[in-house]
């Protein structure tokens, strides 16, 4: 608990304690691309764990039931979920989580869904309503299954930590740009960047790269570039001082390049846990 702070309310001075926390761990339930299958890996969904031991699921993809179970977790362990964008490897498990949380006698509170406000209409109308409300009952909506944190100012507070959203350049069609948001936060006086899905976009990302102490970056390795993800052959030309603090994830099955030889921290492995309380995590 932090020292007390003073807050003015209705002309009076009210003294309230303010809770501060740190994010303790980042756990990769999988590190694969959207179509990862058959190699024992899973889609790149993650868990943030605070020092209160509460957990934030970062994206809820279509294979999250299996990846959570393999790691020994269940919906009972998830108090919060963050959604970066509306592709199935990031939202395909939300119907399962919604039904499981609502109808399980062991779940005492709906999970809180944190996401940019501009994602909410399409998440319900185009992705979830057909399965969660097939009868078009007007009394049923997203809030029936989740507590909704509609992020309107590019940041939300979770367990005392301010987690910032930043738009990424993912899918662009003519003048339309798919809303997609990476994450940036500070813990133990270290700044951590998770790009989520993004093209290689040095002009848009360089400042974040420079300001971060640890970077987890979208990286595809297939021969033919998709055009919607950063490719290893693009990232390998980054400045060496940026590469040495960068981990790579969201890659396809197959042989991996020697990222450490190229100056990166490496490719993240499924189940890998990054403990932010340890200095060596940032070395």
Image (cartoon, rainbow, N blue to C red):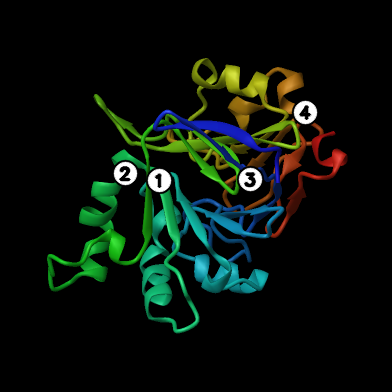
- Marks 2,1: beta carbons within 8 A: yes
The x and y percentages for residue 78 are 54, 64
The Cα atoms of the two marked residues, 4 and 3, are separated by 34 Å
Q: CA distance from mark 3 to mark 2?
A: 29 Å
Closer mark to the observer between disc 4 and disc 1: 1
Q: Is residue 143 depicted above or below 224 in this figure?
A: below
| Residue of label 4 | 244
According to the picture, the residue beneath numbered tag 3 turns out to be: 19
Where disc 1 sits, the SS reads strand
Q: Where is mark 1, residue-wise?
A: 115
- The relative height of residue 227 versus residue 90 in the rendered view (above or below) is above
At a point 63% along the width and 23% down the height, the residue shown is 209
Looking at marks 4 and 3 on the same chain, the residue that comes earlier in the sequence is marked by 3
Q: CA distance from mark 1 to mark 3?
A: 23 Å
Residues 190 and 203: in front is: 190
Crowding around mark 2 (Cα neighbors within 10 Å: few <14, some 14 to 19, many 20+) is: some
Q: Is residue 219 visible?
A: no
Q: Earlier in the sequence, mark 4 or mark 2?
A: 2
Does dot 2 land on a helix, a strand or a loop?
helix
Pointer 3 and pointer 2: residues touching (CB < 8 Å)?
no
Q: For mark 2, what is the residue? A: 119
Reading the chain from its start, which is encountered first: label 4 or label 1? Answer: 1
Which of the two discs, 1 and 3, labels the residue nearer the N terminus? 3
Of the two numbered discs 3 and 2 on the same chain, state the one appearing first in sequence.
3
Report if the CB atoms under discs 4 and 3 are less than 8 Å apart: no
Percent of width and height locating residue 153: 40, 31
Q: Residues within 10 Å of mark 3 (few under 14, many from 20)?
A: few
Q: Tell me the mark number nearer the camera, choosing from 4 and 2.
A: 2
Q: Residue furthest bottom?
A: 105
The extreme front residue here reads 12
Can residue 242 be seen in this snapshot? yes
Q: Residue at x 70, y 60 (%)?
A: 271
């Amino acid at each position: 608990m932090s020292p007390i702070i003073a807050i003015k309310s209705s002309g009076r001075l009210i003294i309230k304690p303010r809770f501060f926390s740190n994010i303790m761990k980042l756990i990769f339930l999988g590190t694969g691309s959207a179509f990862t299958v058959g190699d024992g890996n899973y889609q790149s969904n993650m868990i943030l764990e605070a020092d209160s031991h509460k957990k934030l699921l970062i994206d809820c993809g279509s294979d999250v039931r299996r990846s959570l179970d393999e790691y020994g977790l269940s919906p009972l362990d998830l108090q919060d979920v963050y959604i970066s964008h509306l592709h199935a490897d990031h939202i395909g498990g939300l119907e399962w989580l919604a039904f499981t949380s609502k109808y399980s006698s062991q779940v005492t509170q709906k999970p809180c869904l944190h996401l940019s406000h501009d994602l909410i209409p399409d998440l319900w109308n185009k992705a979830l309503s057909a399965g969660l409300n097939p009868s078009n009952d007007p009394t049923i909506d997203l809030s029936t299954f989740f507590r909704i944190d509609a992020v309107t100012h590019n940041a939300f507070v979770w367990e005392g930590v301010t987690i910032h959203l930043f738009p990424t350049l993912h899918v662009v069609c003519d003048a339309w740009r798919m809303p997609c948001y990476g994450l940036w936060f500070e813990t133990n006086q270290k700044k951590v960047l998770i790009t989520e899905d993004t093209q290689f976009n040095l002009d848009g990302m360089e400042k974040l790269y420079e300001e971060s102490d640890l970077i987890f970056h979208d990286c595809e390795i297939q021969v033919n570039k998709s055009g919607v993800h950063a490719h290893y052959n693009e990232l390998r030309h980054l400045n060496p001082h940026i590469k040495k603090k960068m981990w790579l994830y969201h890659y396809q099955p197959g042989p991996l390049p020697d990222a450490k030889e190229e100056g990166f921290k490496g490719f993240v492995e499924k189940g890998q846990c990054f403990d932010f309380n340890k200095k060596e995590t940032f070395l």
